[in-house]
Each structure stands twice: as C-alpha cells, then as structure tokens.
Amino acid sequence: METKIVLLVILLVIGALQGITYGIILWRTNTIHKIANRFLATILFFFSYRLLAETLYFFGLGRYDTWYYFLLEFNWIYGTLIYFFALSYINPNFRLRRKDWIHFLPVIIEVIWSFFIKAQNFYWDGTRESLTWLGYWGYVIWMHFPTMYVIGGALIVFYGSKAIRVLKNPPEIPGYRLIEKNIVWIRRVVWALVIFSVLFTLFTIIHYFFFDYAFNFFGYPIFVTMAVITYWLGIEGFSRRNTIAFKTIEVPSEKEMEQLRGIAEKINQKMQEERLFKNQELTVGLLSEAIETKSYLVTKTFTVVFKKKFTDYVNELRFEELKFLLSKPENEKFTLLSLAFEAGFNSKASFNRTVTRLTGKSPKHLKNS
C-alpha cells in the first residue's frame, strides 16, 4: 500500500474513532440539552460509520463481497438530524412527536432501496435479462449515477435552511429565555455541514461527468475533510456539552399579567401622547415617574409584555419618528444625523445600531429611499 494511502487510512480511522468517542460522551451527557446532544452524537456516529466504510474499501472489503451487503447507505439522514439538532437545542421542552417521524422517511426509503439494489447481485449472471426491469435500471441509476449523493445533498440544504430559519426566529418557551450568544456555535455547525454537503455533491457530480468515476484520487480531499469535520464536531459538542442556552425566568400569574398589560398600555399611551421618546435623557426611572409606576414593574413589563429591552423599545419609536421626519420635504436640507437627534437618538452609535438591527442595512440607505 502506498504511503499516501496509509496516511489517508490512518487519518480516516482517527477521525472515526474520535467521532465515536465524542459521540458516546455526548450521548451520556445529561443536561437540559440532552436530546440535542444525542442528535449531534448520532450525526457523529453516522460520519464515523461512513469513514470506517471508506477505510474498508482501501483494504478491498465491501466491494461485492459479504461486507457489501451490510454497508448500506445512510446519506439521506443527515439533513433530518441537523434540523432536529438545531430545533431541540433551542427548545428545552422538545420531544419527537408522532408526526415528526415523517422526516425520517427519506432514509428509510434509502436503506430499503439500497438493500434492494445490492440484492440484485444474487440474481446477476452477467446478462441484463437475469434482472427485472426495475432491478436493472435501479442498479444503473443507483450505482452508476450520483443519484444518492445529489438527493442527499439536496436534503441537507433543505433541512439546513429550515434549521437556520429556526435559529433566527426561535420559539418562545414559557419560563425560559434564550441566551443568544450560546447558540452561535449551533449556527456555525449547521452552516459548516451545509457547505460541506454542497461541496461534496458538487465534487461528486464533477467526478462523474468529467472523470467517469475513474480518477481515484479525486475523492481523497472529500474524505479527509469529512474526517476533519467529524473531529471538529466532536470538539465543538464536547466543549459545549454543559453550556446552557437558556436561563429560567419567572412566569407571571394571570393576575400579574393583567397588571403588566395595563402598565404596557399606559406606556404606549404616554409615549404617543407626550412623545417621551424624543427626550434624549429618557430612562426607565423617568418613564416610571411619568406613568406613576414603580420602576421594577416597568422593567418587568418590557421583559414580559413587550419582550424587548427598554432601549430597544424607545429606539424603535425614535426610528419611526425619523422616518416621519425624512418624509417631510422641508427636512431635505438637514443631515440624516441631525434628524436622528431630533427624533430622540442620543448618539450616532445608538442610531447606527438601531437602523442596522431593524433594516439590516446601513443608515445611508435611509436618505436615498
């Protein structure tokens, strides 16, 4: 065996063993993210399985021998696992419901179909007539075309995009508040897996159309990358296995909620009638005095009813006021920043942050639009 092949085999085996080791640790980690850790562990197990299967090929095993019938394909499970990993991490009450199992249907189809195709070797005598129409063309499409990889890549992109949307707009869970900074690594994991899948699929298509699967060295970078990703995923999961993405919050009683809703109504009314948000020195204390309510209740109202910080609430009103000022022709002679201060913003930095957060663009576009 060539030196480069030996090194490759060693790398694949190390990646697989690391994946299995970290997967076992994650599976046994008992925290609020227990289910999410197990989904990540399952991803690691399947990555390790794929690396070990590829290692067997280098030793001449798994190609039309006994191993061939046991090394089934599981390319269509990754997308589902990625999605449920992200979903369960941001929902401490997550449980797989009966209707959720439909998302595992693709991999069930893949396993059954893979076994059916491999079983054609029991009937093959070297002639096309020895196989049924479905067996023959199924074998051709499955084994000679990059069908399974293209579908697998599409599933990962589809479910990865669903996971990214869920992470951007996480569900509100009573009694819990998401700690945004603690889920950044989840986004990183999802994006890494989606990008790797796209590259894997693209390389496979190129390998098929331009090299007719004849360039053996072409697949090496892919499996080296898979080994590295397996190792990295294990490190990411292991180092954050005890990181909690939520903090518990008090759930108000119905009577208290009614009180807080009343305070919220008073705040909205006061802001609109007296335009308190235009006061650059406005604080929670000043607002509390204006509506004759204790400060801690006002703060709690923003947390529970408005579900945002006091500064975000006020700056959003200032932004709406700024848009109103910009709509007036007589204000065209004024700079954007001067109008922002007129709307109540007390600094350029605060103004820039608010516009970027609300529009996703820099403040420059406001004047133009």
Image (cartoon, rainbow, N blue to C red):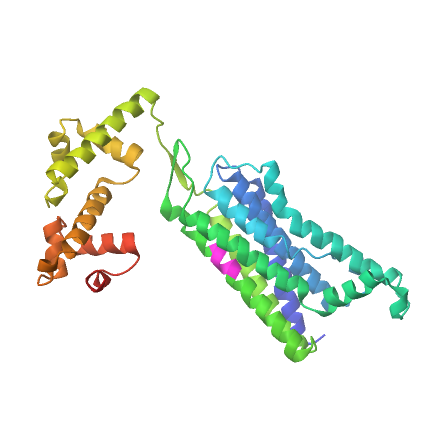
Tell me: 331 left or right of 369. Answer: left
Identify the main secondary structure in magenta. helix
Q: Which residues are magenta?
A: 189-194
Instruction: Assign the N terminus to one quadrant of the image.
Output: bottom right
Task: Answer whether residue 207 is visible to the viewer in this image.
Answer: yes
Answer with left or right where residue 148 lies relative to residue 258. Answer: right
Q: Residue at x 41, y 51 (%)?
A: 184
- Magenta segment includes 191: yes
* Residue nearest the viewer, comparing 9 with 176: 176
Question: Magenta includes 105?
Answer: no
Whether residue 67 is visible: no
Measuring from the top left, give residue 159's x and y in whole percent.
54, 53
Relative to residue 231, is residue 272 depicted above or below?
A: above
Judging depth in this view, the residue of 343 and 31 nearest the camera is: 343
Which residue does the image show at 65% across and 57% down from the upper left?
75
Residue 118 versus residue 218 in the image, above or below: above
- Report x, y in % for residue 29: 54, 40
